[in-house]
């Protein structure tokens, strides 16, 4: 029709070279009759395409145009691209309105860009003034959302030299521009039909835009899910895989084509099928569940996994399936097994320490008492000191061994009170305690006492050699009047002494098991203090007091002041 129309404008006697069936049916002509008509004969000057004459010489009935619009609407519903919508709209306008030009302009970053045009605007409508005016009207329609109609575009002092332009908005998508080579070419029915067609085109563009946005979102979601190290999966009510990320075929060794249609239980050993089926039922019933099971690969390898799933529902709240993630817990299981083995060895060690070592020590201590009744010797005093050190070593080892397994029972503890009690439990000889602490802290009382007694003992032993037997000294330095001070910190407390302090190069080692600077030291006291601090979630560091002595700061403590 566009070619026919263009040729007829150059030569009014032009006959069409072909006659489409749809065109013949629409206007009531046979193919032979239509091929004999010139364009001017076919379209009455006052009516144009909207009121084209039928073969009977009468105006085409309204039903003809309505059917054409319905056909266009059906085709627009099926259109998949913006270009397809534009082509259908422009072609339909030519069949109904008889314009010499029609074009779709879409928005591209606030610029209107022509997508489909029935012909070059300049060639169809004439001068550049008309082209500029058409683009201006299209932009105005797009920006205001209102139709723009100019019945006479061109030299204003000569109305017969004008052109006719109609611009209709396509909402946020752009605008439709329709033009005719003649002035006052479009009547009310023309404009109404063009507006109706524009509404259908806008609806189609809305759908295409929404589909495009949805596709982009799906691509983004797919890419996001494919980047995570965990398995992602969606199951229907029967447990059949509906969606999964790339991690599932990577881990299981199945191809995507194999996974499609597989049931979830097929990814697990037979001895796990019952638990997996029960877990799926639990999710659909309660809404959520977590289960650990061995994932079975295509090669028969079993990999321990933890699966967390949540129920999916439709708009009515009816369960429609489940969605979840699976995480490889191989390392966690290995750590658990290693910890279990360590605990077994720890139990064996505790048994040896508490029975096999303590029993011979008790016998030796009993024999020492009998020996003292029979004779008085300095050797017996040295032997008693050795027994005391063995007793201390056993107590320290038991405290260290049992500390990790002790259940924490935190309570509000007045720091000053527990420090005073701990001081009474430690052999302090001529040392002096000065308590400046006022904090009440949240701590397990028994474990806190372990920490304080070990730090106090360390301060006394490192700060003094007086009034202590040689075997009881951790290191050989300090005086007989060591001062131990306990005070507050903004997030905890400190214990310090006025002894020679701890060399900076060894402060990182003092909390290690067995580290001591004394030949007869156990090296477990500060490790026990560190274990207690860690169990509470506290930090403990060794530093230097203002007077040069050793200082231990315990921070990140929960204060109850």
Image (tube, rainbow, N blue to C red):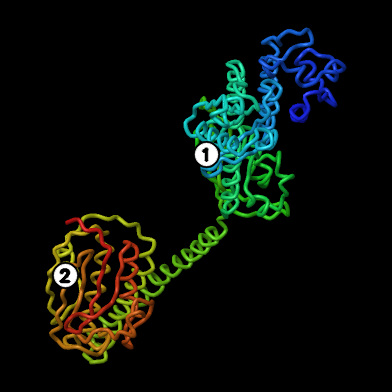
Measured from the top left, where is residue 261 in percent x and y?
71, 38
Instruction: Return the residue nearer the eye: 6 or 216.
Output: 6
Residue found 21% across the figure and 90% down from its top: 376
Measured from the top left, where is residue 49 in percent x and y?
69, 19
Instruction: Return the residue nearer the eye: 262 or 315.
Output: 315
Figure quadrant of the C terminus: bottom left
Residue 405 falls in which quadrant of the image?
bottom left
Residue 406 falls in which quadrant of the image?
bottom left
Secondary structure at numbered mark 2: strand
Measured from the top left, where is residue 499 in percent x and y?
19, 85
Is 501 left, or right, of 438 in this rendering?
right
Q: Nearer the viewer, mark 1 or mark 2?
A: 1
Residue found 15% across the figure and 75% down from its top: 485
Looking at this rendering, what residue extends furthest in the bottom direction?
378
Dot 1 or dot 2: first in sequence order is 1
The residue pinned by badge 2 equals: 487
Is 423 left, or right, of 408 in this rendering?
left
How would you rate the neighbour count of disc 2 (Cα within 10 Å): few for under 14, some for 14-19, many for 20 or more?
A: some
User: Can residue 277 be seen?
Assistant: no
How would you rate the neighbour count of disc 1 (Cα within 10 Å): few for under 14, some for 14-19, many for 20 or more?
A: many
Q: Is residue 337 above or below residue 172?
A: below
The residue pinned by badge 1 equals: 310
Instruction: Return the residue nearer the eye: 304 or 339.
Output: 304
User: Can residue 519 be seen?
Assistant: yes
């Amino acid at each position: 029709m566009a070619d026919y129309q263009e040729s007829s404008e150059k030569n009014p006697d032009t006959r069409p070279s072909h006659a489409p069936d749809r065109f013949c049916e629409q206007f009531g002509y046979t193919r032979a009759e239509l091929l004999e008509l010139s364009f001017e004969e076919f379209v009455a000057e006052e009516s144009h395409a909207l009121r084209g004459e039928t073969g009977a010489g009468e105006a085409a009935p309204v039903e003809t145009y309505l059917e054409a619009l319905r056909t266009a609407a059906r085709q627009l519903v099926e259109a998949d691209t913006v270009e397809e919508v534009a082509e259908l709209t422009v072609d339909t306008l030519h069949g109904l309105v008889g314009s010499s030009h029609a074009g779709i302009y879409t928005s591209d970053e606030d610029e209107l860009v022509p997508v489909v045009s029935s012909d070059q605007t300049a060639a169809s409508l004439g001068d550049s003034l008309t082209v500029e005016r058409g683009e201006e009207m299209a932009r105005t329609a797009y920006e205001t959302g209102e139709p723009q109609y100019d019945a006479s575009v061109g030299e204003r002092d000569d109305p017969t030299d004008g052109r006719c332009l109609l611009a209709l908005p396509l909402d946020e998508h752009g605008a439709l521009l329709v033009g005719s080579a003649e002035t006052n070419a479009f009547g009310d029915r023309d404009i109404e039909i063009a507006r109706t067609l524009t509404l259908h085109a806008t609806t189609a563009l809305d759908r295409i835009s929404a589909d495009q946005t949805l596709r982009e979102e799906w691509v983004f979601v797919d890419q996001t899910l494919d980047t995570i190290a965990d398995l992602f999966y969606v199951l229907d009510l029967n447990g059949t895989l509906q969606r999964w990320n790339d991690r599932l075929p990577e881990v299981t060794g199945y191809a995507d084509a194999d996974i499609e249609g597989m049931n979830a239980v097929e990814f697990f050993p037979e001895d796990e099928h019952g638990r997996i089926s029960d877990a799926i039922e639990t999710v659909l019933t309660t809404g959520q569940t977590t289960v650990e099971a061995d994932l079975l690969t295509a090669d028969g390898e079993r990999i321990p996994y933890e699966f967390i799933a949540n129920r999916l529902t439709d708009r009515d709240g009816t369960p429609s399936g489940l969605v979840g993630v699976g995480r490889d817990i191989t390392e966690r299981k290995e750590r658990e097994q290693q910890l279990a083995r360590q605990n077994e060895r720890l139990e064996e060690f505790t048994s040896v320490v508490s029975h096999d070592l303590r029993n011979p020590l008790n016998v030796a201590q009993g024999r020492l008492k009998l020996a003292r009744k029979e004779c008085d010797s300095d050797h017996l005093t040295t032997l008693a000191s050795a027994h005391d050190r063995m007793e201390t070593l056993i107590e320290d080892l038991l405290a260290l061994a049992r500390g990790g397994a002790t259940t924490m029972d935190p309570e509000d503890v007045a720091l000053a009170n527990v420090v005073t009690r701990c001081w009474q439990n430690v052999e302090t000889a001529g040392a002096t305690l000065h308590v400046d602490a006022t904090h009440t802290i949240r701590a397990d009382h028994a474990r806190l006492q372990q920490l304080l007694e070990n730090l106090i003992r360390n301060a006394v032993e490192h700060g003094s050699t007086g009034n202590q037997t040689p075997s009881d000294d951790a290191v050989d330095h300090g005086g007989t009047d060591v001062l131990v001070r306990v005070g507050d910190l903004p997030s905890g407390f400190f214990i310090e002494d006025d002894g020679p302090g701890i060399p900076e190069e060894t402060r990182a080692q003092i909390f290690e098991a067995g580290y001591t600077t004394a030949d007869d030291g156990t090296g477990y006291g500060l490790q026990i203090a560190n274990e207690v601090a860690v169990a509470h979630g506290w930090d403990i560091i060794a530093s230097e007091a203002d007077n040069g002595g050793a200082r231990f700061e315990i921070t990140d403590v929960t204060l109850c002041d």
